[in-house]
Image: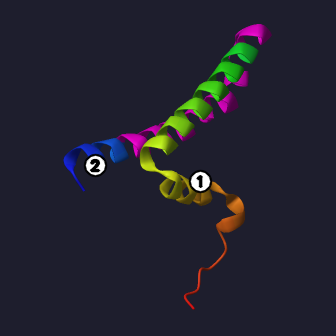
Amino acid sequence: MPTDKKFIYKLGIGLLIFSMVLWLIPVITPFFPISLKLKAGIITSVLIIAEVIFWIGALLVGKEAAAKFKSYLNPNTWKKVKRNK
């Protein structure tokens, strides 16, 4: 893999991880002593930004890698054992 493609792939993976970290902000925002309007604005904007960053990262790493990363985050697949046939 050429150096440029390695950098783009790593950047894409970094964006995917960063978008998942952004999902923590809406979880902790209700506990801050700020107005309800500001809380709603923060939560809405962070969710939109996280989704946009996720899809940009998915475009950079490719469809297969993004699907694999997303499957790691799905709790339904955590207990399934993969068997080779």
Q: Is residue 33 above or below residue 8?
A: above
User: Which residue type does callout 2 highlight?
Assistant: Lys
Residue 30 percent location from the top left of the image = 73, 23
Dominant secondary structure (helix, strand or loop) of the stretch shown in magenta: helix
**Residue 6 got which mark?**
2
Q: Is residue 82 above or below residue 46?
A: below
Q: What is the quadrant of residue 42 in the picture? A: top right
Q: Please name the residue shown 59% across and 80% down the image.
A: 82
What is the residue that sits farthest to the left in this orientation? 3
- Quarter of the image that includes the N terminus: bottom left
Residue 77 as seen in the image, left or right of residue 56? right
Q: Which residue is mark 1?
A: 70
Q: Residues within 10 Å of mark 1 (few under 14, many from 20)?
A: few
Residue 33 percent location from the top left of the image = 70, 12
Which residue is nearer to you in this view: 57 or 78? 57
Q: Please name the residue shown 50% across and 35% down the image.
A: 56
Does the stretch in magenta take in 4? no
Residue 78 as seen in the image, left or right of residue 61? right
Magenta region, residue range: 11-38
Q: Please name the residue shown 57% across and 91% down the image.
A: 85
